C-alpha cells in the first residue's frame, strides 16, 4: 500500500501512504523520508547521489539505481528496513551492492535503472556518456553468493545497441512475462 519515490535532487527515497484516507499524500503523516542518501543522512554511511529508478523486490528489499552527478559514485544500492522502524536509515540497512569499473570522469558511467530478471539475475541500464562503458543493458550474477556484484567478474553485457548518429539516453526498461525486454 505504499509508493516509493526517488528524488535525484535531494538524494532521498520517500515513502508515500495515504494514512488519513483523504485521497492524497499531502498530510505530514502521509510522507516520510524512507532513506536519506545525503552526506551523513543514514547510519550505514551510504551516499546516494542522484537516485534514478527504483525496484521493489520480493522480500521487502528496495533497489535504487544511483547515478554520479559530479560527486559520489555510480551504483546500485540495496535498502531494507531490518528493524521495522519505517525507514532504511539505520546501520546495515543500506548497502552499495554494485559499482561499475570506470576511469573516474563524470559520465563514464550513469546507472539509470535496475530490474530483476525472470532468470533471477539483476539487469541494469547503463547510460555512460564518455564511452568508457558502452551504453546498454548489463546482466549481474552473484557467482560467489556474497550479496555483492564484483564489477570485474560478475557483470556482462546483455544488450549493447548499435551505434546511432545521435547518442540516446534510455530512461527505463522492463521485462514482460514472456521474457521479452522492453
Image (cartoon, helix red, strand yellow):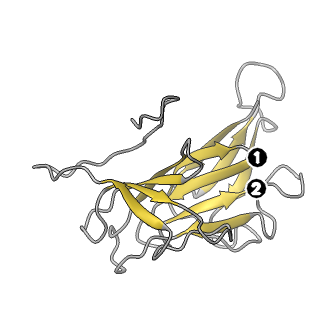
Q: Assign the N terminus to one quadrant of the image.
A: top right
Q: Residues within 10 Å of mark 1 (few under 14, many from 20)?
A: few
Residue that appears at 82% across and 37% down:
29
* Residue found farthest to the left: 165
Secondary structure of residue under mark 1: loop
Q: Is residue 3 left or right of residue 68?
A: right
Quarter location, residue 25: top right
* Residue found farthest to the bottom: 103
* Residue 168, x across and y down, in percent: 24, 48
Q: Residues within 10 Å of mark 2 (few under 14, many from 20)?
A: many
Residue that appears at 77% across and 19% down:
22
Quarter location, residue 156: bottom left
* Residue 5, x across and y down, in percent: 61, 42
* Residue 123, x across and y down, in percent: 49, 52
Mark seen at residue 175: none
- Does residue 137 lie above or below 142 as drawn? above
Disc on the earlier residue, 2 or 1: 1
Residue that appears at 52% across and 55% down:
65
Q: How many tags in the picture?
A: 2
Q: Is residue 123 left or right of residue 18?
A: left
Front one among 28 and 167: 167
List the residue tagged with mark 1.
Answer: 60
Residue that appears at 34% across and 80% down:
103
Front one among 45 and 149: 149
List the residue tagged with mark 2.
Answer: 80
Quarter location, residue 148: bottom right
Contact between marks 2 and 1 (CB within 8 A): the answer is yes
Amino acid at each position: 500500500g505504499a509508493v516509493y519515490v526517488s528524488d535525484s535532487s535531494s538524494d532521498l527515497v520517500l515513502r508515500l501512504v495515504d494514512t488519513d484516507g483523504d485521497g492524497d499524500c499531502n498530510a505530514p503523516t502521509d510522507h516520510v523520508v524512507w532513506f536519506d542518501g545525503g552526506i551523513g543522512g543514514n547510519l550505514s554511511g551510504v551516499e546516494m547521489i542522484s537516485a534514478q529508478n527504483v525496484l521493489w523486490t520480493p522480500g521487502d528489499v528496495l533497489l535504487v539505481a544511483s547515478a554520479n552527478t559530479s560527486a559520489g559514485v555510480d551504483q546500485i544500492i540495496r535498502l531494507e528496513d531490518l528493524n521495522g522502524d519505517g525507514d532504511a536509515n539505520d546501520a546495515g540497512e543500506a548497502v552499495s551492492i554494485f559499482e561499475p569499473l570506470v576511469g573516474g570522469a563524470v559520465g563514464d558511467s550513469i546507472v539509470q535503472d535496475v530490474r530483476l530478471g525472470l532468470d533471477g539475475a539483476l539487469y541494469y541500464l547503463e547510460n555512460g556518456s564518455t564511452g568508457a562503458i558502452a551504453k546498454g543493458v548489463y546482466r549481474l550474477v552473484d557467482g560467489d553468493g556474497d550479496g555483492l556484484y564484483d564489477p570485474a567478474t560478475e557483470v556482462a553485457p546483455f544488450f549493447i545497441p548499435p551505434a546511432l548518429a545521435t547518442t540516446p539516453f534510455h530512461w527505463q526498461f522492463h521485462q514482460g512475462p514472456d521474457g521479452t525486454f522492453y
